[in-house]
Image (spheres, rainbow, N blue to C red):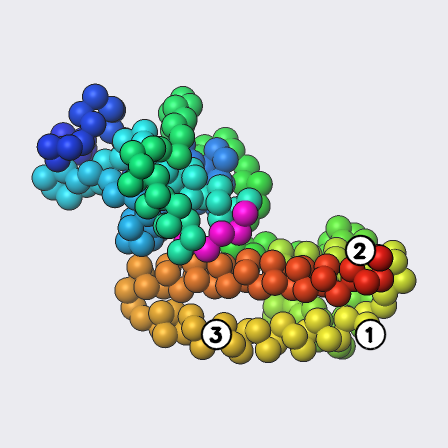
Amino acid sequence: MNEPAASTSPGAARSQPLMSIGEVLGQLRVDFPDTTISKLRFLEAEGLVEPQRTAAGYRKYSWDDVARLRFVLTAQRDKYLPLRVIREQLAQWDSSGEQPGRSRPALVAVGPDGAVPGRELAEPAESSQVRLGRADLVARSGIDDSTLVELERLGVLVSDPPGWYDADALIIASAVAGLASYGLEPRHLRGYRTAADREVGLFAQLVAPLARQSDPAARARAAETARELVALSEQLHAALVRVGLRSTLGR
């Protein structure tokens, strides 16, 4: 069933063809494979994009809206910018009359569930969607079984019952393998687990009130807040380590 024609405000650019949210998702998933319709709705709720609405309430996006979304997603993925900073930059563009750029690639067909047919996702949308057995984890990460046993004993790495490992477990194991090549052993990594647990407790206080709500938009905001907190934490940790090593490097 086709959607009704879009209604436009007096200031809208009527010359631009308008797209449904599914068509926009197909555009963005080529470069941002973990984007979902819920994510697009969340960015709208946060005021980062304002698609037009038809009389029946359907969202209709212009190419300027798509360019705006590309900017937001790129800033999050490549620069780890929080939404507050991204919103400020977009506000500056809005006040100056500039646009973050336009891109008009060919439309991509989107399935009823939002998937792009024939395209493998570069990364899983959620770490929990990946399930690896013990042998697979060892083979793909480069650690040996005895190291895996020690990591689990120290609590650095945990499995999901009945013994499956997710994508984050693979990231942890691969990082441990890389650090081991420089002589670091699992026992040296106990502090990472302790520090991570402290951050989890701190961040959980911030996202739990949203995550407990039944409103899907609130839960999406909780997930987005968690991603931003993790990204900011990674930036802070890396900067502190760099600063701490300057005297050793003589810089």
Q: Residues within 10 Å of mark 3 (few under 14, many from 20)?
A: some
Do callouts 2 and 1 mark residues in contact (Cβ within 8 Å)? no
In the image, which residues are magenta?
Answer: 79-83
Q: Amino acid at mark 3?
A: Ala
* Residue shown at the point (31%, 59%) measured from the top left: 217
Front position among marks 2 and 3: 2
Q: Amino acid at mark 1?
A: Arg
Residue 167, above or below 193: above
Q: Which residue is mark 3?
A: 204
Residue 105 visible at all? yes
* Residue shown at the point (81%, 59%) measured from the top left: 179
Residue 246 painted magenta: no
Q: Which residue is mark 2?
A: 251
Q: Residue furthest right?
A: 183
Do callouts 1 and 3 mark residues in contact (Cβ within 8 Å)? no
- Residue 105 location, x and y as percent? 42, 23
